[in-house]
Amino acid sequence: MTNMSKYVIQGGKTLKGTISVSGAKNMATKLMVACLLSDQVMTLKNVPEIEDVNRLLEVLSDLGVKINKLHDNTYQLDPKHFNPKNLNMELVSKFRASILLLGPLLAQYQEIKFPHPGGCTIGKRPIDMFIEGFKKMGVTVSIDDKYYIFRSNGLQGAKIVFPQITVTGTETLLLAAVKAKGITHLINVAQEPEVIALAEYLNKNGAKIRGVGTSVLEIEGVNNLQNSEVEIIPDRIEAGSFLALACASNSNLKITNCNPDHLQVPLTLLEQMGVKMKIGLNEIEILASKDLQALNIKTHEYPGFPTDMQAPFTVLMTQAFGQSLIHETIFEGRLFYTDFLNRMGANIIMCDPQRVLLTGPTKLKGKKLESPDLRAGIAMVIAGLIAEGTTEIENIYQIERGYEGLIDKLKAVGANIIKKND
Ligand code: EPU
């Protein structure tokens, strides 16, 4: 999925004012899938208006879910006429997060045909842990070159140990286990705020999940779940991207509608770099700070430093004094974008595919770029905003997958950025 529009940025300006954070992509999409577990109406508030949400709404609409947009950022989903036979295979195969559908589908139907999820530029994105989990719950899985066929006589509770922490793996098996027969133990689960918010929503609507917020979940299956109103939490990755932008551009910027509790490790790193800031209940004010000191970054599952913030923070490190080792531990292909930073004037050496050594500070110069994925894409926007001259970014569909109203938000704080439709 691409589009021909591009962003054109005149860089080098400091920014000033207030920038607000939207609802979390990685919670909104999960809740929208969870609606399929009930036949009641779900009302979702603070939904970000982004391409990933639009794609999922298309998938759900094809499945027979009635979608009613009440007003901006508020949707009602009515799954009463949901029919799994109408799964749009082509769309699902292109849209990675659709893998979550397997949870509600296998929880409620005995045979499901599902396309292979594609890889993507940040790594291979295998689904072996999903498959192993479903097998433990009594599902047989056959595979041909295009599809998986999943069959069961109804899901059985089971003990499922994740050899490695997986966010959507945890969520998908949770969505399945809430309606399975008996008790399921999920061991070594992801503890991202979005995963916890999903579990809390399910519990509020009749599920029996114990251990929410810990690494072990005990789930007692139930026959029926309700749906209700739910508000999407602030997007901590969007907030972190704006933090990196504010610090890298030496700006005074207040980031509002965010939850600083979800940003504790990134905020601690910024403090250690010498960033001056004021942290409120749901806002963070960054004060222009000079002579930032470089430091090492190692990505880690929550509450560690998020892989999704690695690229924006790498751009920030190009403006700090000293050497910085960036170690990407989650995805094997998530540092190749550093090549574009070098083309703009950064000094980055790739030690191996998952580690780069960066020496700063360096001035960046505007360039023509193409966004390979969402987070490398926002890193390009930040780099363009601090660079001298003009930066053009193509393939911005990748950026609009996850950042609501980005251009308007940036313009409002003084950025010179426009979207050009070719
Ligand atoms: N993995 C396997 N086998 C599996 C599942 C995962 O080997 O069956 C590996 C992955 O290849 C990766 C690691 O486990 O090396 C962790 O991946 P995880 O499953 O946690 O990633 P994900 O659930 O596919 C979600 C977010 C990503 C975010 C990661 C890590 C959604 C829709 N996506 O992906 O978000 O980077 O967790 O926090 O929730 C983004 O927003 O830009 C984005 C990519």
Image (spheres, grey):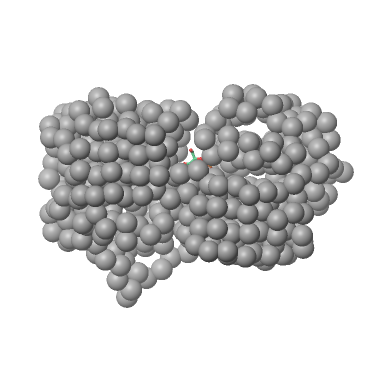
| Residue at the limit of the structure toward the bottom, as seen here | 422
The x and y percentages for residue 404 are 41, 56
Vertical placement of residue 142 versus 188, above or below: below
Picture quadrant of residue 363: top left
Left or right: where does residue 42 sit relative to residue 323?
A: right
- Looking at the rendered image, the quarter that the C terminus falls into is bottom left
Depth check, front residue: 402 or 131 = 402
Count of marks overlaid on the render = 0
The residue located at (47%, 30%) in the rendering is 302
The x and y percentages for residue 373 are 40, 52
Picture quadrant of residue 346: top left
The residue located at (76%, 44%) in the rendering is 225
Depth check, front residue: 1 or 107 = 107
Question: Is residue 80 among the parts visible in the rendering?
Answer: yes
| Residue at the limit of the structure toward the front, as seen here | 281
The residue located at (81%, 51%) in the rendering is 109
Picture quadrant of residue 330: top left
Left or right: where does residue 274 sit relative to residue 311?
A: left
The x and y percentages for residue 266 are 34, 32
Left or right: where does residue 218 sit relative to residue 24?
A: right
Depth check, front residue: 63 or 405 = 405
Question: Is residue 117 among the parts visible in the rendering?
Answer: no
The x and y percentages for residue 357 are 25, 32
The residue located at (58%, 38%) in the rendering is 197
Vertical placement of residue 169 versus 411, above or below: above
